[in-house]
Image (cartoon, coloured by chain):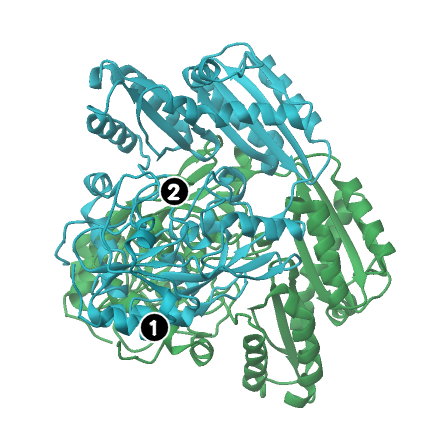
Chain colours: A cyan, B green
């Protein structure tokens, strides 16, 4: 890995000295991903303090043909922020740019720099009695730039959408250092501003997000959480349909968990299910500014029992009970970790395809790996399940992953629901994506980053396809 | 306007004969826009019956270097679907492709062809007890392809977002005839599917939408409509902030109207305001699946009166009263038409900027045109107002438009909130948009349509800028 001899000196001259980090110990944390699946090399870690510094650094990298790996909180689950390959490259950490510039509770928006931590943004909104709805396990470390670059999902997508749905404005630095300011906080802006969307969910391969204006919403004042056991996935869908009709927008979470997943939670932790056993369980949360929520949920569930769709259920009668129900759900991942080697999948499907998909998955899995067992749970309400598989050892993981992805593909789903492709899923994605779609992406890449210096090896077809 | 001599014959051979219309009488309606501002020329109007036919026609046009003007219901307000300029071109009408392929009330989605009429889609959703929320004056004629190409807004944006927020999947034909099927109905799909966004709101200059999968939502079961008079725009914002806190998602419309606009309604129609006069009026609608809505609205308004933010107000106590309140709002455009020549603006602003913007507008307008009077109304809740100006005659229109657009620009707003640029606003947009942003758009255009055959003269910089 080389670049022009005085390259680092030019970077230092363009910024403050402290912005160019070459000490191996200080760099180490930036060169390995959160899950410790990937480690890369870099000439330096750059820590600019302003958009203008980002622009100057990008310009110098472009001149020297040095690639740039944008990095926020480094909490990604697909290796999207870790250097990949042999091209000379630098990590560009946005962590130093973390100002919250403006919170507007009437205009329902917040303007922040890319390095701002998700939790800080949520706190700043809450201080003005508003909610920034993106919420996920890593919110204490994940940065706004990262959640935008990956179009992050999380637990509130059913009600509030993906990150894309909450971005009003962006400031972006292009591959040649050009800064484009499109931060204005407008919900309606059809003045050819569709280009902004290219920088949301493209994992830093088209440009670097340096700041954003995000949409805020009202905070729900009332909340209702319930746990219901159902005999099969088809009846889970019936309950979901009814919940949509009766609760509408108040439905904020609709989680599906298979019995085995919760049995593992009960066996590994001092936790007990408060409902009679079923083959599947639903965790249903509703939230609203309007009163009368619990009564509406109770009436809905009575109807569900009368229809025979559910066997047993409980509506939390206190905040503590609500927390207990969520605790069961939240311990599934840890219980999985204690149960063997797991192959994790982040898939989405048309909701109505879940019964057929899960039945085929259950039936065929033993043929793929005789000793495999499933650990299925996730956000049924937004079509995203974690179809995880436990194995006695790592051998067999690739076969299981291909089996699950092929099945997802056959049922019209996506192999990357909310985590992105990064470097982890890009080969599988390439295997299952049409050549026409890959070529379209490559054309867009060539238009915005013709020399390929932005985040090489991530989120795009690996093979070169000749353009027609 | 010429093309290879047997070009039309090749088109006919590639489709059914009836798909290639050259009769001038049958073509006429396709060559003039809805507002009769623009009329263009075309070699033919093409009416394909399938995506494969679209693909074949596009391929033949590309070979002959004939431009293509995609057209849906031809209800656009900015001339985006009318041929422009001297390049040989055809109108590609999607009207014949209007199947509603699938309605899924549990998976909350609907798959339709581009020519499907918005009203039909709304009806099909309603038949399954669901709502497709895009609603606008032209919904009886506007097509889904058109509302996607223009990222249409309408009256429900405050609550449900723009069309972009409701598109799950797309099928697109590219400028070289390539068909890309990305119709899968997934709310979470981070498998590099951000490219879909380029075809939403780009007014047909990057590709042709042939089908779409749209998101459905639950239908509100309860509704509350109220009319309130307020002394100034600043207090209107205070009421809006309180309504957000108290009603949250249940707030579905928050309209602002100046007194003069409603006085024109009263003087031209047999309609009377049921509240005491104020300088400004608010029309507030709330909707929810949950009960108790009217009580919550009434409590909110009592608080608003106690704070002194509003002078008078009425909450509709019946569906008929609710309709009456909306009738007042809906007659504003017609009353404007009866009051002189009007210069219409479709602008959006950061909501908190409205008081300063409107005060400067009011103060300076007489200096721009001594006999001008204002007719301001619109969707305050989503930042989109129609800042219209009445003049005794057409002379002076250009000066007024530039004055309004300059003022919008100075206050951080957009001169095209929901109607798009088309050919009507492209010059004004070019005047007010940075060179960097225009060059970015041109690069994207070059990547997807290098020969410029898709909808020339619309929605993009007119001048050629040399790429760096």
Residue B422 appearing in the image: no
**Of A85 and B151, which appears nearest the observer?**
A85
**Of B188 and A46, which appears nearest the observer?**
A46
**In the rendered image of this protein, does residue A162 appear above or below residue B388?**
above
> Which residue lies at the image location 41% right of the left edge and 28% below the top edge?
A352
The percent position of residue A299, horizontal first and vertical second, equals 67, 22
Quadrant location of the N terminus of chain B in the rendered image = bottom left
Q: How far apart are marks 2 and 1 (CA)?
A: 52 Å
**In the rendered image of this protein, does residue A205 appear above or below residue B290?**
below
Mark 1 residue element: helix
**Of B238 and A111, which appears nearest the observer?**
A111
Q: Mark 1 points at which residue?
A: A56
Quadrant location of the C terminus of chain B in the rendered image = bottom left
The chain holding disc 1 is: A
The percent position of residue B224, horizontal first and vertical second, equals 73, 45
**Of B13 and B461, which appears nearest the observer?**
B461
**Could you say which quadrant of the image residue A9 lies in?**
bottom left
Callout in the foreground (2, 1):
1
**Could you say which quadrant of the image residue A387 lies in?**
top left
Q: Name the residue under label 2.
A: B99
Left or right: where B95 falls relative to B10: right
**Could you say which quadrant of the image residue B249 lies in?**
top right
């Amino acid at each position: 890995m080389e670049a022009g001899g005085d390259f680092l000196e030019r970077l230092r001259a363009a910024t403050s000295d402290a912005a160019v980090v070459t000490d191996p110990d200080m760099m180490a944390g930036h060169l390995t991903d959160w899950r410790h699946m990937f480690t890369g090399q870099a000439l330096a870690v750059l820590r600019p303090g302003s958009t203008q510094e980002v622009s100057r650094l990008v310009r110098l990298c472009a001149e020297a043909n040095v690639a740039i790996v944008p990095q926020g909180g480094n909490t990604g689950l697909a290796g999207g922020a870790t250097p990949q390959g042999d091209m000379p490259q630098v990590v560009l950490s946005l962590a130093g740019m973390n100002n919250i510039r403006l919170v507007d509770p009437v205009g329902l928006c917040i303007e922040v720099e890319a390095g701002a931590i998700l939790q800080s943004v949520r706190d700043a909104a809450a201080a003005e009695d508003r909610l920034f709805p993106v919420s996920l396990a890593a919110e204490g470390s994940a940065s706004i730039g990262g959640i935008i670059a990956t179009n992050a999902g999380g637990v509130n997508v059913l009600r509030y959408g993906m990150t894309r749905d909450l971005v009003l404005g962006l400031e972006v630095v292009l591959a040649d250092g050009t800064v484009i300011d499109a931060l204005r906080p407008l919900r309606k802006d059809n003045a050819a501003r569709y280009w902004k969307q290219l920088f949301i969910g493209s994992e830093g391969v088209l440009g670097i997000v340096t700041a954003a204006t995000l949409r805020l919403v009202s905070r729900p004042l009332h909340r209702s959480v319930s746990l219901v056991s159902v005999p099969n996935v088809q009846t889970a869908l019936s309950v979901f349909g009814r919940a949509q009709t009766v609760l509408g927008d108040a439905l904020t979470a609709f989680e599906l968990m298979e019995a085995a997943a919760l049995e593992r939670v009960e066996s590994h932790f001092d936790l007990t299910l408060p409902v009679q056993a079923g083959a599947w369980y639903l965790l249903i949360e509703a939230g609203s500014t309007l009163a009368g929520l619990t009564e509406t949920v109770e009436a809905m569930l009575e109807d569900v029992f009368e229809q025979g769709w559910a066997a047993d259920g409980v509506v939390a009668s206190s905040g503590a009970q609500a927390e207990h129900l969520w605790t069961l759900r939240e311990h599934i991942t840890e219980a999985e970790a204690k149960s063997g080697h797991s192959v994790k999948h982040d898939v989405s499907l048309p909701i109505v395809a879940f019964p057929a998909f899960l039945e085929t998955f259950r039936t065929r899995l033993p043929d793929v790996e005789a000793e495999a067992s499933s650990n299925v749970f996730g956000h049924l309400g937004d079509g995203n399940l974690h179809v995880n598989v436990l194995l006695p050892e790592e051998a067999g993981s690739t076969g299981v992953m291909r089996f699950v992805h092929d099945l997802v593909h056959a049922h019209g789903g996506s192999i990357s629901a909310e985590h992105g492709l990064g470097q982890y899923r890009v080969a599988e994605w390439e295997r299952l994506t049409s050549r026409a779609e890959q070529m379209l992406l490559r054309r867009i890449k060539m238009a915005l980053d013709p020399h390929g210096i932005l985040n090489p090896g991530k989120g795009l077809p690996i093979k070169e396809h000749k353009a027609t």
